[in-house]
Structures are given as C-alpha cells and as structure tokens.
Image (cartoon, helix red, strand yellow):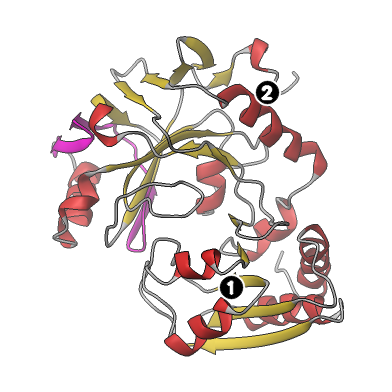
Amino acid sequence: MDVGFPELFQAALESVRRCQVTADERVVVYTDSEKNPAMVEAWYAAALATGADVTLIRATARFPETDPPEVALTAMRSADIIFDLASNTWLYAPGLPPIIQAGARILQVLVPERSIIDRPPTDDILWRADVSEALTADTQEIHITSPLGTDLRGRRGDSPWHAQRGYVWESQQWDSYGVCMINCAPEVETVEGVVYFNGPMILFPQYCYTTKRPIRVEVEAGRIVHIDTDHEEARTFDRWIRQFDDPNLYVVAHLGFGFDPRADLESFDLAAWESYYGGVVVAFGANTAPQLGGGTSATGHMDGILLEANLTLDGVPIIENGEFVESTGLRSPG
C-alpha cells in the first residue's frame, strides 16, 4: 500500500518529538530534486508545528558522499538541528564535520517511505541500543568467524562504539532514521584475515544486492589485498571498488552488528539490511563520520552484512550463527 502525506506527517511528528525540537531552535530541512515531496512536506510541517524557526532548502540531487551546495552548508552550520532528507548520503563528505563541530545535531532520513511507517524508533527496540552499548563498553578484541570460512580479527583502539537509534536529541549527534546497529572504527593495521560476504552488499549507489554466492575477500593490515572474482556478484564488487581509483576504498571502515528484529532482508531497504538482527557488519572505505572517530577519508563507502556468522568481543561470545548469545540479553523471545 502506498504511503501518503497523512501517514508520513504522523511519523514526522513523532520523529520531531523524539529529537526534542523546541520553539527557540533553528531548524533546517535539507532535501533535493529526487526526494518525494510528500516526505519533505511532512518533516517541514512537523518542525513548524513546534513553533521553531524552520528553513527549507531544496537542491539538485548529488552523487553519494558529495557535499551539498555551499549556501546550504552555511545555513546548516548555524542550525541547531538538521533533518537531512537528501536522496543520497553525504555522511562522509568534508562538509559534514564542521556542521557537527558547530553544535548542530543531524537526523538523516534516507529509508523508503514504507520503512518510515514500519520501523520507527520505538521503546520496544531502543532498549537494545542501551544493552549493546553496555556489552561493547571497554572491549578491544573483535573476532568474526563463520561456517563459510570467515576469520577476521582486529582491535578497537581508541575509537568509540557508536550505537544508532534513529533519532538525535543532543548537540553534535548524527543518526539515521530506521538504523539500529552498533559499530566501531578499528585500528586499521590490526585487522587481519578472511571475510566471506554472504548477505546484503551495500555498494552505493549503483549496486545494492544480496549475494547468492559468497564473496571471498582477503584483508592484511586493515586493507583488502584480494577479492576472489570467481562469479559475477564478486566481479560486481571488484568493479565497484575499482571505479573510484582510490586506495582508501580498500581500508577497513568499521565493524559491528545489527539488532532490529523487524528488519527484513527481502525488502529493498538498506537501513534494514544494516540493522538486521544478528547480522555482522564489515565495512570498507570512508569512516570520518564524527561519531565513529575514524581517520580514513575516501570517495566512497561500502557495507557488507554477514549472515549466520559469529562475533566475540575480548573472547566473550556475542553472536553465534546469527543469533545473540542468551547471556547478552539481546535475544528475541521465541
């Protein structure tokens, strides 16, 4: 069933409420020429309903990880909160960190309209972010394995674990609506091993698919040194990464896991893929998002989700065969 303005407006009202927008705040709604106008109007009207000073900026759509126009960046640097309704992400573009450093909080709304209704941030999901933060706090050693042969190790180092909840409520926060996962940017040189990608591959913007055959990738000192190109989906990954002609696309960006039991791999929802309950996330490319604290600038970013994998932190099992270990407190009933 199609989603119209009334349903989107109700979701936007709840989003604005969770983001604690107040009448004395400066709000920017940023969008582009490819976004559904009903969604834009929903967030604009919801922000206006708070009595806040709201500025709507609509620009020409841009390639992923490309800055908005300077006039938009200038407005955002003086905002208290930004609802980012662009059709492509610019999380790793150079213009975003100065906006965060100036004190703004940013909520990206990139998910499909149906997912806005079906997977909002709700209390019965958000507790999992709190538990995930407690589980990962102060952990260092990350070990990911799978029955297919994945065996990847690394250390977190000084970067934080960043849990995403789908809303922002404090200065200098960034989050994305519909995303429920936790990640860290590991010490690059410590990451070694082999990864068999067997789930969704988010190769934005051209190639986003769930691989039918595992893609084997070798990693040394935090860099991809070999991609087995023995089938078409693996060759697609290789073509995607080569097109940038950027050596930093081969650098590990972040490691983590999703915890949203509502997430469905059958729908084309990249946020659901990243958030998939018990899915292990292995990403390469840019990781300069302020909340990750990574140091790799790159012209692109990819996320691969491992299904039925295992993850341990400091030797303690967290996920076994795609299911949270009972002692974590994250396991779904049933």
What residue type is disc 1 on?
Leu
Instruction: Identify the residue under disc 1.
Output: 85
Give the quadrant of residue 137.
Answer: top right
Q: Residues within 10 Å of mark 2 (few under 14, many from 20)?
A: many
In the rendered view, does 105 fall on the left or right side of 316?
Answer: right
Residue 163 image offset from top left, x and y in percent: 59, 40
**Residue 265 visible in the displayed image:** no
Q: Main secondary structure of the magenta part?
A: strand
Q: Secondary structure at mark 2?
A: loop
In the rendered view, does 276 fall on the left or right side of 312?
Answer: right
Q: Residues within 10 Å of mark 1 (few under 14, many from 20)?
A: many
Marks 1 and 2 close (CB-CB < 8 Å): no
In the rendered view, does 95 fall on the left or right side of 34?
Answer: left
Residue drawn at x 81%, y 41% is 123
The magenta region covers: 202-229
**Residue 243 visible in the displayed image:** yes
Instruction: Identify the residue under disc 2.
Output: 330
What residue type is disc 2 on?
Leu
Residue drawn at x 73%, y 57% is 169
Decide: is 62 above or below 19: below
Give the quadrant of residue 234.
Answer: top left
- Residue 211 counted in the magenta span: yes
Decide: is 303 above or below 135: below
- Residue 205 counted in the magenta span: yes
Residue 128 image offset from top left, x and y in percent: 70, 32
Relative depth, front residue between 111 and 293: 293
Residue 199 image offset from top left, x and y in percent: 40, 36
